Image (cartoon, rainbow, N blue to C red):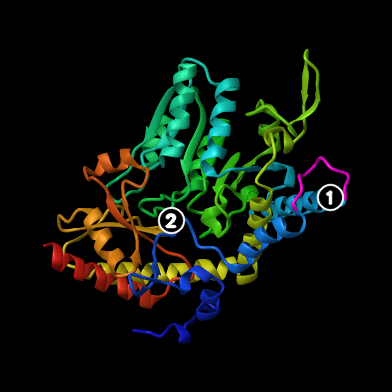
Amino acid sequence: MEHIANIVTAGLDIAQIRKDFPILQQQVHGKPLVYFDNGATTQKPQVVIAAEARYYEEYNSNVHRGVHHLSQVATNAYEKARITVAGYINAADPHEVIFTKGTTDSINLVANTLGRRFLKAGDSVIISAMEHHSNIVPWQIACEESGATLKVIPINERGELLMDAYEALLDDTVKIVAVTYVSNTMGTINPVQDIITLAHARNIPVLLDAAQAIQHITIDVQALDVDFLAFSGHKIYAPTGTGVLYGKKEWLNKLPPYQGGGDMIKTVTFEKTIYNELPYKFEAGTPNIAGAIALGTAIEYLQQVGIEKIQQREEELMTYAMQELRKIDGIRFIGDAAHRSGAISFLVHNIHPFDMGELLDQQGIAVRTGHHCTEPLMDLFKIPGTVRASLSFYNTREEIDKLVAGIKRAAAMLL
């Protein structure tokens, strides 16, 4: 086994990076914490924790509403975070960045507003067979309310989209395509550029759920030419309850407000309300100011480390993990796509995933077990759930070795 102190890969000093994350220093059940549940939420570096605390300690005040000093400091920090996010995804204008509670909130915003304005009986919406519930249920609701139909892109046994079937689904009834960039369960990286190009050939907008892509892959919304992109702060080393909806200005201007309240209005009378311009039209009420500021800090932290280095590091870890896990007797991967990132889902013999997860936890190893909010996908594979190990650049080969040994130990006890 390697020693963490000696790790320098992709130009990164991993021992130093791990010191940036206070939670990684602890023990669980008397063993050093091995955290492989990054797909559910990533751990937070000290600079992010400090940024959120600093807001409450030094300049806690509401944004956009006060002429006093604290309000101006808070507003400047909040809007600076928006500029940071816009730069990270290469949005053409910071006003195309809407702060939300997270991916779920962002998708609901589009499904609700687009459904009200553009969906009617006879129309259809395309999603895929590997979607998270947050990119299924909002579209089901929109379709039920409008009389539209939900179409599903099928996948093969490796967990890859059948692009011929997707192309066949694209017709004049389709009003939007909403698909995940990276599967939260299988780690499949979808051919999003092809998905967008094919949809745009028929003037159909595309929404990408980037919750599992934003922290692993460089995303350029202008190069992709994507119409909407959603992600969560807590998946990218920022606080929970924060997120982003990117939308092309032309689309965001077409959509009606999602919620009514303060900050999303210009003038209000009992007869008529005039809505505010972007991005405030979609940011009703007092936002999670501290969280948004800390989201900006998290992105700045990743930019300092280097997103290309992070991507290279994680690809090395993924290759090593798959190589070592394949050596385990009786292991079955759920999804084994040629292009993958972040997550590995598997079963071992006929062991229930919960039992495997509990025995790994006793060894200080945190993995996710269950259906991962992708029940239709579990039904497709005819399984109750999986064990999911999801990686971050702060993980190590030594931790992967511990995971492999832990699975073997648990299997020996359970078989």
Q: Residues within 10 Å of mark 1 (few under 14, many from 20)?
A: some
**Left or right side of 336 for 241:** right
Q: Are marks 2 and 1 in contact (CB under 8 Å)?
A: no
- Viewer-closest of 6 and 272: 272
Identify the residue position indicated by label 1 in the image: 72
Between 173 and 321, the residue placed more toward the observer is 321
Assess whether residue 61 is covered by the magenta stretch: yes
Quarter of the image for residue 339 reads bottom left
Please say if 99 is above or below 18. above
Location of the C terminus (image quadrant): bottom left
Badge 2 marks a residue whose secondary structure is loop
Which comes sooner in the sequence, label 2 or label 1?
Answer: 2
Q: Position of residue 207 (x, y in %)?
A: 54, 39
Q: Is residue 198 above or below residue 44?
A: above
Is residue 150 rendered to the left or right of residue 409? right
Residue for point 73% across, 36% down: 280
Q: Look at 47% across and 56% down and name the residue there.
A: 41
Residue 145, position as x, y percentages in the image? 48, 18
Judging by the rendered image, the residue that carries numbered circle 2 is: 39
Outermost residue, front side = 57
Residue 356 seen from this side: yes
Q: Main secondary structure of the magenta part?
A: loop
* Picture quadrant of residue 58: bottom right
**Residue type of the residue flagged with mark 1:** Gln
The answer to whether residue 393 is left or right of residue 253 is: left
**Given this view, does label 2 or label 1 mark the residue nearer the observer?**
1
Q: State which quarter of the image contains the N terminus.
A: bottom left
Start-end of magenta stretch: 60-68
Residue 294 in picture, x, y percent from top left? 65, 57
